[in-house]
Image (tube, helix red, strand yellow):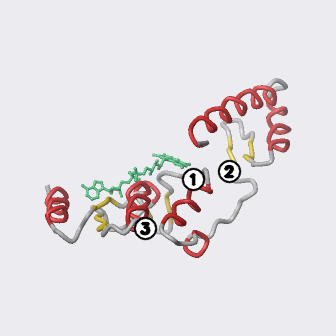
Amino acid sequence: MTHAFILNTALNNEQTDYCCRCGPGGLATALRLQGQGYHVEIFESTSRVGGRMRGFEDGDYAFDTGPTILQLPHLYDDLFASAGLKREEYIPFTRLEPYTKLRFWDDSTLELSTDQEKLKQQLAAFRSDLPQAFDRWYAEETQKYNAGYEP
Ligand SMILES: Cc1cc2nc3c(=O)[nH]c(=O)nc-3n(C[C@H](O)[C@H](O)[C@H](O)COP(=O)(O)OP(=O)(O)OC[C@H]3O[C@@H](n4cnc5c(N)ncnc54)[C@H](O)[C@@H]3O)c2cc1C
């Protein structure tokens, strides 16, 4: 109820063209709208912005609650550029290699890498047909990417 009240108040305020919540979706929308000259207010029901990206701390431990892999980095560049800003001045990206290390129940590990040959060599150690399966999966995903993102 409190949240609905806050949003209604903002919507009735003549100064405000749009209001957004503060997950990645809302923040991106706010930035894009502000870049187009709209007056935007953001509202967040918790104490910190970031939505599922925000994570939480308990004592000495920090917990990652959502996105772990930054996908499609060029979309961030486009987003900031739409508001006349340079993404790297606000969010510097550091490429990690490997970007994720998976540890399985039998203590075997797989280090995910953007270097496909490196990744396929590791897959081959699990099962000889996996590198070809990876190639098939990658070809399918490339088609989906092109359908979704290319003009
Ligand atoms: C376990 C997990 C792993 C994931 N891994 C990845 C990954 O590796 N890479 C990737 O790109 N994506 C990943 N995702 C997906 C990504 O987290 C979501 O796509 C993204 O967070 C969606 O953003 P959003 O702004 O739509 O929603 P949310 O992140 O849910 O943000 C919504 C915000 O609105 C606030 N809010 C809700 N109601 C109100 C209200 N009434 N008033 C004010 N504020 C309100 C919430 O507190 C929250 O801050 C993962 C998701 C999960 C759950």
* Amino acid type assigned to the residue bearing label 1 in the image: Thr
Please identify the quarter of the rendering in which residue 76 is found.
bottom right
Q: Which residue is denoted by mark 1 in the rendering? A: 68
**Whole-Å distance between the Cαs marked 2 and 1?**
9 Å
Q: Residue at x 23, y 67 (%)?
A: 16
Q: Is mark 1 within 8 Å of ligand 1?
A: yes
Check disc 2 and report its element: helix, strand or loop. Answer: strand
Check disc 3 and report its element: helix, strand or loop. Answer: helix
The picture places residue 85, in percent across and down from the top left corner, at 53, 72
Q: Is residue 106 placed above or below 70 in the rendered structure? A: above
Q: Is residue 25 left or right of residue 46?
A: right
Q: Are marks 2 and 1 in contact (CB under 8 Å)?
A: yes
* Amino acid type assigned to the residue bearing label 2 in the image: Thr
**Whole-Å distance between the Cαs marked 3 and 2?**
34 Å
The picture places residue 64, in percent across and down from the top left corner, at 51, 56
Check disc 1 and report its element: helix, strand or loop. Answer: loop
The picture places residue 118, in percent across and down from the top left corner, at 84, 44
Dot 1 crowding, Cα within 10 Å, few <14, some 14–19, many 20+ = few
Please identify the quarter of the rendering in which residue 138 is found.
top right
How many numbered dots are placed on residues in this image?
A: 3
Q: Which residue is denoted by mark 2 in the rendering? A: 100
Q: Quadrant of the N terminus?
A: bottom left
Q: Quadrant of the C terminus?
A: top right
Q: Residue at x 42, y 65 (%)?
A: 31
* Amino acid type assigned to the residue bearing label 3 in the image: Gly
Q: Residue at x 68, y 43 (%)?
A: 103
